[in-house]
Image (spheres, grey):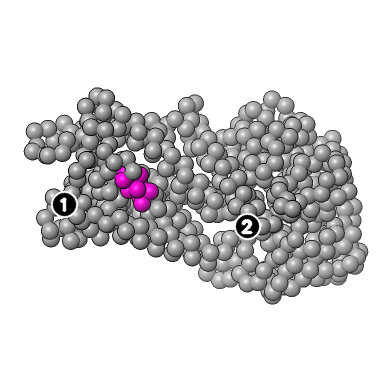
Amino acid sequence: MQVADSALINDGGDSRPVRARSSMFAALKAMLRTLYALILREARVRHGRSRIGYAWAVVEPFAVVSVMVLFFSAIDRGANSVLAFPAFFASGILPFQYFRHTSSFIGQSLEANKPLFNYPTVREFDAVLARLVLESATYLIIMALVFSFLITFLSADPPAHIGTMFIGFAGLGLLALGVGLNIAVLQRRFTMVNYVYNMIMAPSFFLSGVFFSIESVPPKFRDVLVWNPILHGIETYRAGFYAVYPDTYVSLSYLCLFGLIALFIGMVQLKLSRRGES
Amino acid sequence: MIHFEHVSKSFRLRSGARRRVLNDLTLTLPHRNIGVLGRNGAGKSTLLQLIAGVIDPNWGHVRRDLRVSWPIGFRGSFHPQLTGLENIRFVARVYGVDEQAVIDHVANFAEIGEFLNEPVRTYSSGMGARLAFGLSMALRFDTYLVDELLGVGDASFRKKSRAAFDQLLHQSRMIMVSHSMQALREYCDCGLLVDGGTAVFYEDLDEAIEAYDAMIG
């Protein structure tokens, strides 16, 4: 009795068109279909003029992270770090870049896909989710490449608890979704939002545990730094990389709560800002 | 049927003021070919977008128990860097129809040959219009929304478009915005006059045209 939610091709036959989104199940199917179409389109369009296309999305951050790892390792040589620096830095910069790129990429999702919302089946939240999925998949590949590189050429240890790394990664994904959605909605009214966000993110590079472990920070700075949700994602991720890693001050629930609240506020804003306002 | 229930729509202007387009409109549109008339800026296109469900009213609801198209011939969604084929595939995927069938249909209709494999940015405006119109014709809807777009392309393409449209109208209906009384008379049998924040439905198109003529004096 469940009819498929699909328009039929005009073949001159007398088949009746079926109703759109006739049930929850049909609505979910329609959404997944739209998501799939959007992901393919975004992947294709991202570096559209380039011949190697989407490969750039992997190659570029991979090259940037690798150079940074090598550069900062060279500077650090001889310092009395207990934890091998290249791996320490890589396990900080990778989740940081994942968060930074994903949140800004999602922040542009509504503006960049604006014409597509003229198709009634394409909803705004679909465009937001498509970018989260695409960027997450991209960063999983980049992470696999960077760690393979470190293990092969710099004889780093393989990650100890991959499950924990995934949890940190997912927490940052949730945060990026929440923050990115807010940027995307706010951007429709205030074009300044992007500049402000970039201004906030520049110092975050030094305040999110990319270069240090929160455990090693003097208490008076630590009390301030622990309010930064990104730090908890990065430290969880890194704690998963090492067999033993001090994580007394790391709170995954703080990160998730922060992400969920941001997501909720973003959803309310999206609901309140009616389409076709400006 | 398409139901407007206490629908209000206004736009914020750059100056900060609001421009009301529809004010507490309650209306039921039958499943017929409806010609939409009104002055420039009266809100005809806004009404069409509300029917399609691509913009939200500030107040009230629009309910539809039919499958409604996107505005026919719309080509803003074509990404200039993607080829014609890739753009077609996107729409086919979104609507969950067989990609190859849509491609065959559009290729056959648009007659732009090898250009289907070229990025849309290389298209002439005529080719873009053919692609957009062909794509609109490839999917089946209960109601097609048409905004002043039946006159694209050269004479032979217009003839072909008209034939395609005539065939669609065996089973589907359309809601058409036009300033051409001739076009409206050709396709529509009833009318909707949009003016002053409201819209009045006329069972007979000629009555609607008379009212429109009286209005513009």
**Position in image of residue A58 (x %, y %):** 40, 33
CA neighbours of label 1 inside 10 A, class few (<14), some (14 to 19), many (20+)? some
Camera-nearest residue between A245 and B58 = A245
Q: Which residue is mark 2?
A: A24
**Position in image of residue B129 (x %, y %):** 72, 40
Residue A215: numbered disc: 1
Left or right for A166, reference A84: right
Q: At x 82% / y 49%, what residue is drawn?
A: A16
| Three-letter code for the amino acid on which mark 1 is drawn | Glu
**Position in image of residue A262 (x %, y %):** 40, 61
**Position in image of residue B169 (x %, y %):** 86, 49
| Three-letter code for the amino acid on which mark 2 is drawn | Met
Provide the residue span drawn in magenta: A164-172
Q: Chain of mark 1?
A: A
Instruction: Kindly give the residue lying farthest to the front in the view shown.
Output: A1
Q: At x 23% / y 32%, what residue is drawn?
A: A157
Q: Is residue A169 magenta?
A: yes
The tag earlier along the polypeptide, 2 or 1, is 2
Above/below status of B48 relative to B97? below
Q: Quadrant of residue B99?
A: top right
Camera-nearest residue between B110 and A124 = A124
Q: Chain of mark 2?
A: A
Above/below status of B81 relative to B205? above
Is residue A45 visible to the viewer in this orientation of the structure?
A: no
Camera-nearest residue between B144 and B98 = B98
Left or right for B125, reference A199: right
